Image (cartoon, rainbow, N blue to C red):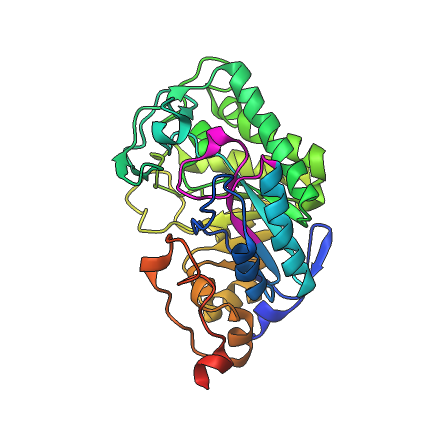
Amino acid sequence: MNQQALLTPVKLGNYELRNRVVMAPMTRDRADNPELAPTALHAEYYAQRASAGLIVTEGSQVSPQGAGYLYTPGIHLEAQIEGWKLVTEAVHARGGRIFLQLWHVGAVSHPDFHGGALPVAPSAFNPRAKAYTPAGQLKDTVTARALTTAEVKQVVADFAQGAKNAMAAGFDGVEIHGANGYLIEQFLRDSINRRSDEYGGGIPERARFLFEVVEAVVGAVGAGKTGLRLSPSNTWNSPPDSDNRALYDYVIAKLSDYGLAYLHLREPAGDVSGIPNMVADVTPHYRGIYRGTLITNTGYDRDKGNAAIGNGTADLVAFGVPFIANPDLVERFRHGGSLAKADAATFYTPGAKGYTDYPLLQSAAA
């Protein structure tokens, strides 16, 4: 096995990256200001991790309607664009590349985020989850209302505008969040999408929203600056489709025609072997279907990542939690250094603790 495979250069969209280590998008809840704008603390956090070949930011709502988590930064206000400029400038100063993740949570929200109005979804749907709301309480989600056809088209436009705003903030590109049970995945799955208009019905109709978003974002910033994240075997926030394999086989085959910078796939977070028509080994399966650059994510360490690159399963590997506690993760991979353990109690708490205070390997050894 090539123990340096992760550290070799790779072409991704419009860019040549210095290594194949991707910092995965991770919600961190640090935009604790009225505008939900990134701050100098965000800039420090991302700059510390700029040795990654590519950073994908935390999900950023493309409109107020897209919010569902406390203190997540948006990309729809001028203050947010200005805040993100701090981040991109800091990352670029250290030679890094950074994409913004465009996000709409759909039903995974609560009326407290929307002035008492219901969250939205393809159809009336309650994800039966918990939402930590602006009221400072953990509350049960409610049954979201169905978007009208006109509102669906507005959400498509919001994604395109979010992509343009990201460019104005200095990002190298954007990643469309189509994973983890949020709005795009809610449209894809017949367990949720029971619409009777052009966005509901068979697989092509349920996939229409996704492809309209992709086309709108590509039209706004170019295919070489557009990535997409999917989780074909996700069971979180969205019940499985009646035939997940057929659904994602169709979607991912069609995505090959768009020339995207990359497709970012999540492996299942748990055992899905008992679910009919669910793909257990996501990236190997779709490597044979998708013609383009693949990023794989979930459950990887250095050795598994090197193996995935070495055997051709993926072109890049995204790491989430390891990047929280190891801002110099690339250097630790390079030198075989041990990894620090992240403090889960500070994943979603405001402030620098558990965010920008993890030491570098040399500092930790001193």
The quadrant where residue 112 appears: top left
Q: Position of residue 79 (x, y in %)?
A: 59, 40
Q: Which residues are magenta?
A: 56-77
Front in this rendered view, residue 218 or 120: 120
Residue 68 appears in the rendering = yes
Residue 262 appears in the rendering = no
Front in this rendered view, residue 33 or 81: 33
Q: Is residue 213 above or below residue 305?
A: above
Q: Position of residue 146 (x, y in %)?
A: 41, 19
Front in this rendered view, residue 274 or 64: 64
> Residue, x 51% and y 20% (percent of image)?
199
> Residue, x 63% and y 60% (percent of image)?
91
Q: Residue furthest front?
A: 34
Q: Is residue 91 rendered to the left or right of residue 141? A: right
> Residue, x 45% and y 84% (percent of image)?
365
The quadrant where residue 209 appears: top right
> Residue, x 40% and y 53% (percent of image)?
350
Q: Position of residue 182 (x, y in %)?
A: 43, 35
Check residue 206 for magenta coloring.
Answer: no
Q: Position of residue 363 (x, y in %)?
A: 48, 80
The number of callouts visible is 0
